[in-house]
Amino acid sequence: MYVDSHCHLSFPELADRIDEVLASMRRAQVEAALNVCTTLEEFPRVHALAQAHAHICCSVGVHPDTQGGAEPDVDTLVRLAAAPKVVAIGETGLDYYRLKEPLDWQRERFRVHIRAARAARKPLIIHTRAASEDTLRLMREEDAGQAGGVMHCFTESWEVAEAAMRMGFYISFSGIVTFKSAKDLQEVARRVPLARLLIETDAPYLAPVPHRGKTNEPAFVPHVAAMIGQLKGVAAGDVAAASSSNFFKLFRYLY
């Protein structure tokens, strides 16, 4: 059995056909999924979907790219994180890929999420893109290791993975690891211990080979496990078992 540790079931590409998506999950032996929040405005939909389905849990947070919506504060995040089936704070982090300085607002938002995770005693879901140095610096400064969490959709170097794992974080790989161009990332995936590894889709984006270019969905996460198994020289089932165990341990989620 597999777990999709990060997807966006509330996005229109999946929400508009949610019954079909959940049925495909069952056929693919994907036993649970974490539906991840990206804005405070989206949270009621994210939470309602988790409430409606026993095998779906959710998070609360504001994506680092988001501008123009409600800005989170620690009290709001802690209050929402106390709702049933909310298992994490995020996704949060830093993303310098599209946005240009000054980005003090983005760094402050990340700090707010880390403080909320520590206060709520919930793990963090961290997104980092073109910002790994600052991401690790803020994690250290705000003692993110006290909350723990996961570096989601990981695409950084082994050195970044190692630094995050030293703070107690898990490393999650998405369909990107199946891409032919992802040789460096594949080497990182080979080196990350099974005990610190999660798998995800980040659906509806980043569909793995052999579905690349299609709308991604949780049913495709076994392809991620298969590639990691191939890289490590172990069965996909071993990756599935380890990553599922890690998921339930990290997010303290039972259904």
Image (spheres, grey):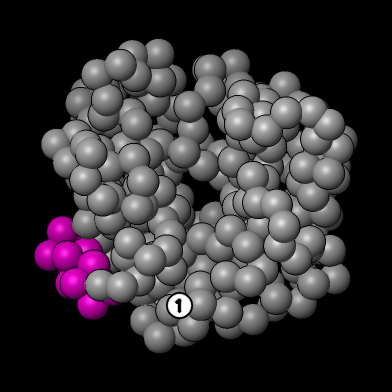
Q: Which residues are magenta?
A: 18-29
Residue 249 vertical position relative to residue 165 in the rendered view, above or below: below
Residue 245 showing in the rendered view: no
Residue 71 at x, y percent in the picture? 78, 61
Query: Which residue shows up at 77% across the image and 42% down it?
Result: 106
| Residue that label 1 marks | 50
Question: Which of the image's four quarters has the C terminus?
Answer: bottom left
Query: Which amino acid, by three-letter code, is at mark 1?
Result: Ala
* Helix, strand or loop under label 1: helix
Quadrant for residue 102, please give it. top right
Residue 120 vertical position relative to residue 192 in the rendered view, above or below: below
Instruction: Estimate how packed mark 1 is, as few (under 14), some (14 to 19) or many (20 or more) residues with alpha carbons within 10 Å.
Output: many
Q: In front here: 97 or 26?
A: 97
Q: Main secondary structure of the magenta part?
A: helix
Residue 218 at x, y percent in the picture? 29, 57
Left or right: where does residue 208 sit relative to residue 49? left
